[in-house]
Image (cartoon, rainbow, N blue to C red):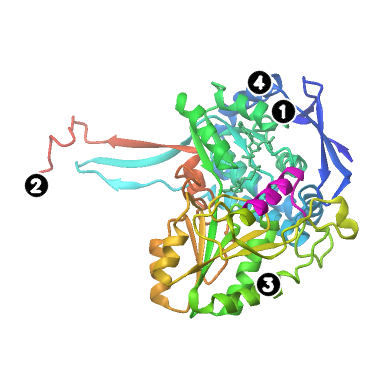
Amino acid sequence: MKEYKNFINGKFVDSKSGRTFENRNPANWDEVIGIFPKSNAEDLNMAIEAAKKAYPRWRAIPLPKKAEIMRRAAEIMISKKEEAARLMTREMGKVIKETRGDYQEGIDTALYAAGQGRRYFGYSVPSELPNKICFTRRDPLGVWGLITPWNFPVAIPSWKIFPCILSGNTAIIKPATDTPASAGELVQVLYEAGLPEGVLNIIYGGGGEIGEAMLSHPDIVGISFTGSSDIGMRIGEVCGKTLKRCSLELGGKNGQVVLADANLDLALDGVLWGAFGTTGQRCTATSRLIIEEPIYNKFIEMLKARVEKLKLGNGLDETVDVGPLVNKGQRDTVAMYVDIGKKEGAKLLTGGEPYTEGECAKGWFYKPTVFIDVLPTMRIAQEEIFGPVLSVIKAKNFEEAIKILNGTTYGLSSSIYTNDLNKAQKAAELAETGIVYINAPTIGAECHLPFGGMKNTGNGHREGGWTAYEIFTEVKTVYIDYSGTLQKAQIDTWQE
Ligand code: NAP
C-alpha cells in the first residue's frame, strides 16, 4: 500500500485539509491500493498559483521542444506498461488485457502529441487584396482544470493532458476518487520525461469539493470534463455563467443493430465484447441490441449460450473475461436497473444477480445479464446503466432498427452488422451518434481519430486526434499587409 500526496509545482505536498481517503481493489475489497489526500480549496489554490507561474515560460518554449518531452514520456510509458496495467486492474477491476490496452492508448496519445509538435497546422488562405497575406494560428489559453472518470484511468487523463500541455497551457488534474493511483503515476512519468515544474499538477479529492471549486475559480480558463451527463450539465451551467470554455464528454446508450443478412457469428463476437468488455462500464458500451425480426429468435439462442460461458473473476487472471464493477454503488445501480427491467415487463434471459462464487465473494461482481423483448421506451432501453446489462429489442426492418437506434437522448456510438453496402452506408448517414461502426462493435476507438458524441453525450467538442487540440486552443486570425497603402477590405476591390 502506498501513501500518495498531491503533486504541486513539481513537488509532493501534504494536503492542508489533513484528511485522507482509501482506494480499494473492487475484486477484493480487503486489499487497500493506496491512501490519498482528500484535498480542499486551499490545496487547489496552491496548484493554480503554480500553474499560473509556470504558464508564461512554458508557453514560450517552441512546440517541437515541448513535443520532445511527450516523446520521452511515451518511451517511459512503454517501459512501465506491464506494471501500470497491473496497478490499473487492481484499482479499477477491468481485466489485464484491457488495462494493457488502456495504457497503450495513453502511449499512442503521447506519441501523437510528439508528432503534433511539428505539424501544428493553421490555415493560410489568399487575400482578396494584393500584397496581403492571411493565416490562422492556434494559441494556448492559460490554466486548465481537467476532471476525469474512473473507467479509463490512464487513457482519458492522457487524452486531456497531452493536447492541453503540448498546446502551451498549464493544468491541474483531478482524477476520479475510484482511480487516483493510475493518474498519479502518469503525472510522474511526465516529470521524469523533463516537464518543467508547475506545468501539470495533480490534486486528489472529491468532485463535489475540488471539482466544484475548479469550475468557479476565476484563474481557470477552461474545464475539460469526462463523466456522467448529470454532472456534465451542472459543469456546463456553472462554466456558462463566466463564459469559461468547457468541453464535456458524457454518457451513452449505445446500440448495435444486427440485420438479417449479417454474418451472425461476427455480430455475436461484437456484441459480447461491446456489452460485457470492461464489465459494461464504457461510455461506448453496447447496452442495446437491436435485431431484425427474421433472425431474432436464432440470435438470442446463440447469445445466451455464449454469455453463460463468460468467466468472471479477478482481472489479473489472464483467463478471466469479465471483472467486477468498480464499487458497491455501481453494483447497486445495476441491481436497481435489473429490478426496473423486470417490473417493466422485459424478460430476463440470463444473469440478473450478483456473482459471489469463491474469491469473487469479496468483490463487486455481477453476472452478465441479458433482457429480451425489451420495448424501446422502457427505462432499461433509455437510461445509461453502466454495467453488464444488455437490452435486446426486436425491429421489423432496417428503417425501424434505425429509428430505435436513434430513439434515445444520448448519441455517442452505434454499430450495424450487415453485408448490404447500401444499408451500411445509409446507417452511417442516419445514425445520430458521433461514432459509427460498420461490422464492428460500439467500442474500439483509435486515439488519432475524433471521439465524442451528439445530443446529451456532450457539447460538440471532440477529443482524440487533431480535434482535441481545438479544445485547448484559441484560433487567432492574422492579416499582414505589405502594400504600404491603406487597403480597405470589401471597399477597395482589386483591379487590373
Ligand atoms: P461522474 O460521477 O460524472 O464523475 C466524473 C468526474 O467528475 C470524477 O472525477 C468526479 O469526482 C467528478 N465530479 C463529480 N461531481 C462533480 C462536480 N459537482 N463538479 C466537478 N466534478 C465533479 O462519472 P463517473 O462515474 O466517474 O464515470 C462514468 C460516466 O462517465 C458515465 O456516464 C460514462 O458514460 C461517462 N464517460 C464518458 C466518456 C466519453 O468520452 N463520452 C468516457 C468515459 C466515461 P469523484 O470521482 O470524486 O466523484
Q: At 29% across and 41% down in the image, what residue appears?
A: 133
Task: Single out the mark in the foreground, 2 or 3.
Answer: 3
Residue 440 is drawn in which quadrant?
A: bottom right
What numbered label is drawn on residue 8? Answer: 1
Check if residue 326 falls in the magenta segment. Answer: yes
Ligand 1 is found in the corner quadrant, namely top right
Element class at badge 4: helix
Q: Amino acid at mark 2?
A: Glu
68 versus 195 height, above or below: below
Q: Amino acid at mark 1?
A: Ile
Residue situated in front as seen by the camera: 202 or 168: 202
N-term mark: 2 or 4:
4
Q: At 67% across and 52% down in the image, what residue appears?
A: 339
The answer to the question of whether label 4 and label 3 lie on touching residues, with beta carbons closer than 8 A, is no
Q: Which residue is mark 3?
A: 304
Q: Is residue 192 visible?
A: no
What numbered label is drawn on residue 333? Answer: none
In the image, the segment drawn in magenta is 324-340
Check if residue 332 falls in the magenta segment. Answer: yes
What numbered label is drawn on residue 496? Answer: 2
